[in-house]
Amino acid sequence: MKTVEYKLARLEEQNAALLRKLRHQENEISRLSVRESQLREVRRIPLLQKRLDAALGEREELECQLTETRRREVKLLDELNLLKKFVKLSENPELAEVARQCANYERIQEDLKTLGEQLRIISVERDEYKKRALLSCEEAEYYRDKWNASFNEKRELENYIRKQLAEKETANIEISVKSPSCYSVIERSSSLSVTPAEESHSVEDSQHLRQCLEEERARSGALQETIDALYEQQKEQRRSRSHERRLSSPPAPTKNIYSTSEGGDTELSIQTLRKQLQLSEGECKILRNRWQTIREENELLLARLSEQEQKETFWQNQIRKLSGECDQLKRQLEFFSQAKSMILCHHNESSCGELLQC
């Protein structure tokens, strides 16, 4: 008996343990199922969000359609009221004509406002074009005067250089005549007893003189060909005065026709003049191009100005025409208002007569 009872107790304990384990597993299963359902819901959130966004977009579209439908409804109601008014006016042709004239008058007033604004803009543009044209003309005149002044200074410089070259040639000839070599040549040619060495020396001196004169003529010709413009008048005048003083001083007699220092100064002055003349030529070309550009711009501005004036005259004619139409419509409106008042008075008199008869 004890063994059976013991076994029964053991079985009951095992059953209780199994029941506890079963409850624990059931709780775990329920917790896992809840968690799985939560995870399933979380996975469905993006899809639900998309559906929500689609529903919101559809709602907005429906609201827009609703507002558009209400707007159309209001518009249709306005048209219906207008048609009702027209139906009422169709019974009275005088009032219909007055309403039509009023509508035309309002339209013409709007057209007049638009044309007036356009005319104001055109007048402002015309004034601006006039100012720009005047400024361009003044600038063109300034550059033309400057170019003429540069051209005159260039011509004066050319004349001055020609004069200096001529004076230099005459001075060189005088130096060659007064030089001891020339005296020796004259004495040797005049004497009867002339040695061959002295004759060869005199021939060499004469050839050297001719060669120097030819070189000077070639230099002067090259300088005259390169002269085209003037650059920096004050500096050039100072240089010309110093050069004139240097040339006007009496030359010292030497064995050769040109000393090394004088030849170097002449060459340096010629190179300086060439550089200055090249710079003056470039400046003159720039001024000429600028003047031509300003002249073309001025012509374009004048053409646009004439076009704007033509447009302005056209719009003025249009405004004048519309003003005439407005005056005519005003007279017609006054006439129709007088006719309407007369009709109303006649209608009131007839209604009063009927009441009196009754």
Image: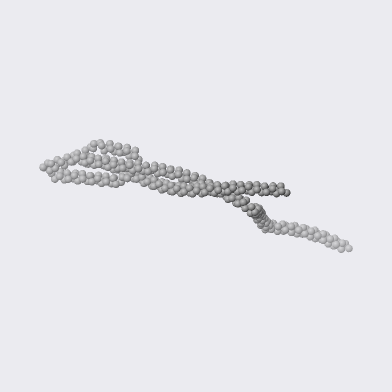
Quadrant for the N terminus in the image: bottom right
313 or 209, which lies in front? 313
Vertical side of 123 occupied by 34: above or below: below
Residue 74 in view (yes/no): no
Q: Position of residue 199 (x, y in %)?
A: 15, 44
Q: How is the image coloured?
A: one colour
307 or 266, which lies in front? 307
> Relative to 118, is 140 on the left or the right?
left
Residue 229 in view (yes/no): yes
207 or 76, which lies in front? 76
Which corner quadrant of the image does residue 70 belong to? bottom right
Q: Position of residue 319 (x, y in %)?
A: 52, 48
Name the residue rendered at 67%, 47% in the picture. 349
Q: Position of residue 282 (x, y in %)?
A: 36, 46
Name the residue rendered at 59%, 47% in the picture. 335
Which corner quadrant of the image does residue 152 belong to? top left
Q: Position of residue 239 (x, y in %)?
A: 31, 38
> Relative to 208, is 305 on the left or the right?
right
268 or 133, which lies in front? 133
Name the residue rendered at 39%, 45% in the picture. 291
- How many marks the image carries: the answer is 0
For this orientation, the residue located farthest to the right is: 1
> Relative to 11, is 351 on the left or the right?
left
For this orientation, the residue located farthest to the front is: 357
